[in-house]
Every structure is written in structure tokens, then in C-alpha cells.
Image: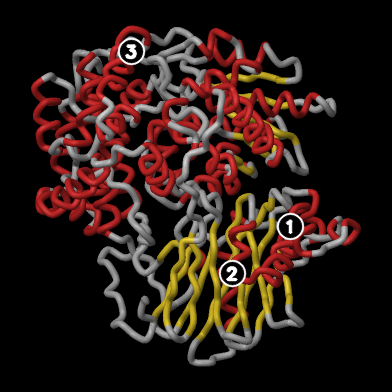
Amino acid sequence: MTALAGVWLLDGRPEAASRCRAMLAAQAMYGGADAADAAEWSNGDIALGRSLVRQLPEDRFDRGPVLGGEGRFVLVGDVRLDNREEIAAQVGLQRDRLALLSDSDVLMSAYQHWRDDCLEHLLGDFAFALWDSGQRTLMLARDASGQRPLHYHVGGGVVAFSTMAAGLHALPEIDAAPDEERLCQFVMSAPGIGERTFSQGVRRVEAGHSVVLSTSGVVRRRHWNPVREPIRFSRSNDYVDAMREQLDLAVGRRLRSVGAIGAQLSGGLDSSAVAATAARLLAGSGGRISAFTAVPRSEFMADTGSDRMSDEGALAGDVAAMHPNMDWFTTSSVGRSLMQDLTDNLTFAARPALNLSNVGWIFDTYEAARTRGAKVLLTGNAGNITLSYSGFERLPELLRHGRLRCWALEAKALTAHAGMSWRGVAAMSFRPFGAERLWQCAAHYFGRAESNGMSFTLLAPARLPAARRAMAATGAARRQRTDPFAARLSALRREDPGLGVKAALAGWGIDLRDPLTDRRLVEFALRVPSAEYLRDGQPRSLARRVLADRVPATLLNELGRGRQAADWYERLESARPALADEIDHIGANVVASRLLDVARMRNMVQKWPINGWNGADRVAGYRVALLRGLSAGHFARSFAHQEPVVAPPPDRWSDR
């Protein structure tokens, strides 16, 4: 894990080195603590640097910017390559030479061998910048799932990049100001769109993309384009065997570390798959793994009317009991301040929290892992669209292809074996073909409020018309998908976990690694036919069969889903006075008050629910809308400038 920075002064001023050092200093919490951990290369008007946190055995060989091509190429990388040996064999690196190289060194060898096409050969988590002095170009690139962030700025005679936006804000040419349009999308629950960030004048390199900057302009390229053609095996069990192999390889690739390994462990399939697989792999060498489960207080009884599990501790305990080398610990957010979570999230993740109620248990898990000496924490966040994909898009897919009999059989099986209602099956089957407004009216008629920005938002009234039009357009496009491949690929591309990964590093020295984002596992999962995921009325059928050799039957047979932070409203109630104070601060800020309906926020705190928290409307109103608005307002008022900075006029940095 590394903090990167670089600056290119187009007017030729020889000040790049000092500016690069300032950019690294502004990202100190994400890099090494000692001066020896920082290194830079400069040549007058351009400088590249990195500050390293040593988390891989090979990091001891990392000396900073890597030079290649007899000095023509300069690379700084935030890199963990999971196929070092494979790349070395392909580019001609001998084993004894490879043993003395950092992952950035191996990446440079790959670039010199394949040039830009090297991106298609890399497995692992990475963000890097490469300067080509011969072509006078700067290439920025990120891995397929965006596990490492990378931001950049062009304009005003300056080209610059950094891991976090704070590095760019260290430059005098880049004012720190919130991007109101992006915050508006956030409040409305719209997905992140393109390169836009929450900071004005700061762009992000999108996951699976590269950006090449030159005096001719900006060229963007998507380097990760998974194959669509389905895999066809003769037997259903062949898919199970192949997915098990992919899972073992993906987890194994993420066990390389200079310290102990930990894992998040809920009562769900994904985290259980990762933790159990890691335990099996480590057992062969006598290794152990620590697993951490977030649970509510022991006397807690859910008051939200949810049919989801509020405490997954028992199921997680069953998983841990199955693996003798797994040490199991539970954590609880009892007594943790919601307002402190708001502050800590801003400090470490440098963004508003999408689900503020979840921040507490997530940060508690990081603290528990740090206390137990873990340097790596394995997660399974991407499982819903890879290993444990539900397969529900198969229903509209069958309708689209006119396979009505197959649809009827699968729909009947879902109601008989998965406990689903015919209304729910109909919604999943026909909604992709219908008007969004029709489904909203139906949901309202049946008293089922949707927990998203379209049904409840605290956006300022003046912004609502334009925001609703934009949201309706994206929502309609999302729901037109009747294609499992396209639906999952779109979901993967909407995610951008890099800032969360950096938050764990900055606050707790923990390296988050998600094996279920492994590129080869993802590519395999996308090509498995949907019939393997939704089979005989059993959602997540493939995952249940794959995991039968490593998790207990109690978990495999559990059809319910856990509710994260089920005790959210208790923490909300204890924070009520502080909520009122924060809303007053938001109302006093020009940008935040222009963005949000502050009067409505105050009214929600004053007219507190008195008959419990049962009901989807209260979950949508308080857990989603109020906390999301609070997070957006807190972020907006964290900037020194009350008014947004006017962007400079267009210059030669035109996109093409």
C-alpha cells in the first residue's frame, strides 16, 4: 500500500520536486511514517513520488520510483501483483532475479515487454503512474475492480495526480471545494458517474481504465473488457468444481503478507467462503486466521419489523467451529458515537458515507483486527455479483427469450422453496420491462416504500426537478436489463472501493483484500450460465453447492439474510442532540444549505418517532435519507471555501 503523487508543470518551471514533496506530505496518513519510506524522481518540470507502507515480503526491495528503458520510463506504483511468477516467466525474468524484485519492479518489466497491453496481463490490486520521457506522456491506470484509488487534475498549465484528493489540494492551483453536482447525485442515491469526484476540479481514474495525458490532450481507455460468451460444461458439478478452484486460487493469492491474516466473518455466504477457504489454505502450513463478527448487544431485540436476521453471531460461530485454526472474535458498536463515525469517515475515507449506520461496526472490526496483530483483513464484499450471485435476473431473461414454461416452473419453485411471494416474483420478472413510475405507484399502494433516493430524499426543493429527471433516466436504464451478464458487470463498474481500502490503512494500518474481486474469478463467474445460480427455486444455488465442503449445513440451509447494523436506531437515538447541532452547522454553511432541505432535516429530529421504528418508511426516512443527508452536509461544510471555485476556461487539455 502506497501514497502516490506527481506533478508536471507545462510552462517548464523547475519547481516540480518541491510540489511533489508537498503532495506526499498532504497524504502522510496513507504512506509510510518515516522519511525513508518516501522517494521521488524529478527532472525540473516533472516529478513523481511515492510513500510506502511495507505490507508484502518483497516490499523490502522497493527503492521508490522504478526506472526502465535506460531511464526513458519512470514508474510509481501502489501495487500488489498476484501473478508475479507468471509474468516473470512470460517476460524472461529468472527466478533468482525475481526473488530480489518488488512488485513495482515486476510491473516495469511487464510494461517494457508489452507496453500498454501489459494491463491485460496483471492480476492483483494496483494503481500506478508511468512517465515516458521519449513520448512526453503520463499514463495512469487502475485495476479492474478499483481496489486502489487514483485521482488527477488537468488545467491551468498543471498536470497532477495523487492517490487521494488531498494530495492535489496541496497544489496552489487546485482549490479545495466540493462538487455540488456529485453531492446531489449522492443524496439521491445515484451511482457514481464516470470520472466525477466529490471535489471540484479533481477527477478519478475509473476502475479498469487507463488515462494517458500529453500536450495533445487526454485519452481514456477501458482496459478490462471481460468475455461474454457463456462457459458450457457437460455436467452441473463441473461448474461447482471449477468455481471451487477459482475460489481457492483467489484467496491463496491474497495471503502474501508481512503480518498476520484476519477476515471479516458474518453469517452470510460470501465472508464465510473467504474466511473458511483461507483457514483451509493456511492449515497446510500450520498457519492461523482471526475472524471477526459484528453483533448487536446481547439483549437486543429488533424493532424494525424486518424479516432479516439481526444477529448473525450463531451462524458465524458455526463456521469458526468447523476450522480448528480459526480464532473467532465478536465486536459490538455499543457505546460508539455516531457523530464520531461521521468525523472518522471523513478523516480517513475523505468522502461522505453512503451508509453511515454501517461505519461503526466496520471500524470496530478494523480496531479488533489491529489489536490482534492482523496486517491483512480479508473481505467478501463483491460476492453478491460473483460467487453468491442470486440469479434473479434469470427470470426476466427467460421472459425475454420467450421461455415461458421454464419461467413458470422457476417462479413456482421460488414460491414453494424460497418462501417468496408471487408478488415478489412478479416484480423481479416484469419490472425490467415496465415504466419506473408504475412500479413506484404500485409500491406505494401496497405500502412498501423503497429505501432509495427516489422515494425519500432530503435534497433542497430547488434541486429536486432536475435531480429527479436525471435519477429517473438512470433508474429506468438500470431496470431495463434483462441480461444477467450485463446486470452484474454494470454493478461491478458502479462500485469503487478504493477510498474505503485507504481508510482502513490510514486509521488502523490494515490492508483490505477482497478475493471475490479477483479478476479471473470474476471473469469466470460472469460466464457461468444463470441457470447454475438460480436452480430449482434456490437462489445462490451455485455458492451453496461450492461451499458444501467448507461451511456448515446450518449456513447453507439458511434462506434468510442478515441485516447489517440492526441496532442502528439505538445509536441514532443516543445521538439525537448532536444531530440537531450538526444540522445547525449544515444550515449555516452556504454550500451545504444550498444542497439540502435543512428545514425538513430539523423537523425530522424534532418530530422523533414515538411508536418504535417498525416500518419501511422510517428506515427509508431516518436510516437512509437523514443519515445520508447528514453525511453529505458534513462533507460539504468541511471545505474551507463556502462558495464553489469557478473552473478555469478550457485550454488545450481537451478530451478526445
Q: Quadrant of residue 53?
A: bottom right
Residue 480 image offset from top left, x and y in percent:
24, 41
Which of 130 and 520 lies nearest the eye of the viewer?
520
Disc on the earlier residue, 1 or 2: 1
Q: Which residue is mark 2?
A: 116
Marks 1/3: CA distance? 49 Å
Q: Which residue is mark 1?
A: 87
- 10 Å crowding of disc 1: few (<14), some (14-19), many (20+): many
Q: Secondary structure at mark 2?
A: helix
Disc on the earlier residue, 2 or 3: 2
- 10 Å crowding of disc 3: few (<14), some (14-19), many (20+): few
Single out the residue that lies furthest toward the bottom.
Answer: 12
Residue 498 visible in the current orientation: no
Which of 446 and 538 lies nearest the eye of the viewer?
538
Q: Quadrant of residue 316?
A: top right
For the point 18% across and 36% down, the residue is: 433
For the point 27% across and 48% down, the residue is: 585
Q: Secondary structure at mark 3?
A: loop
- 10 Å crowding of disc 2: few (<14), some (14-19), many (20+): some
Which of 406 and 569 lies nearest the eye of the viewer?
406
Q: Amino acid at mark 3?
A: Asp
Residue 15 image offset from top left, x and y in percent:
57, 86
Residue 148 image offset from top left, x and y in percent:
55, 53
Single out the residue that lies furthest toward the right.
Answer: 96
- Position of residue 476 relative to residue 470, above or below, is above
For the point 30% across and 29% down, the residue is: 398
Q: Which mark is residue 182?
A: none
Q: Which residue is mark 3?
A: 307
Of the two numbered discs 1 and 3 in the rendering, the one whose residue sits closer to the viewer: 1
Q: Is residue 555 left or right of residue 75?
A: left
Q: Is residue 448 left or right of residue 631?
A: left
